[in-house]
Amino acid sequence: MHSQPDGVRYEQVVTVPFGKAVTLPEPVGIVLDTEALTQWAR
């Protein structure tokens, strides 16, 4: 996930393995469970 754009680039990059949860910052503000994506990951 890329976040905190500064007009030229994203300041923060978060990488998690498929199957782990990733917290999306505000204004979205949810926890995205990526377990369902594991069936498409190799």
Image: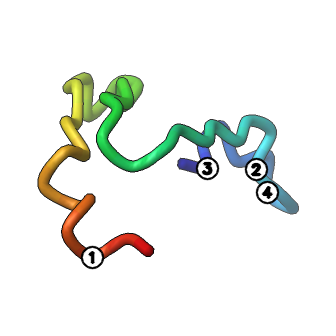
Callouts 3 and 4 close, C-beta under 8 Å: no
Pick the residue in front: 30 or 22.
22
Relative height, residue 10 to residue 25 (above, below) = below
Callouts 3 and 2 close, C-beta under 8 Å: yes
Mark closer to the observer (3, 4): 3
Pick the residue in front: 8 or 22.
22
CA–CA distance in space, label 3 to label 2: 6 Å
Amino acid, disc 4: Gly
Circle nearer the N terminus (3, 4): 3
Residue located 70% across and 47% down the image:
5
Residue underneath mark 1 = 40
Residue underneath mark 4 = 7
Mark closer to the observer (2, 1): 1
CA–CA distance in space, label 2 to label 4: 8 Å
CA–CA distance in space, label 2 to label 1: 26 Å
Query: Quarter-wise, where is residue 15 in the image?
Result: top right
CA–CA distance in space, label 3 to label 4: 13 Å
User: How far across and down, in percent of the image, does residue 2 sit?
Assistant: 61, 49
Image quadrant where one finds the C terminus: bottom left
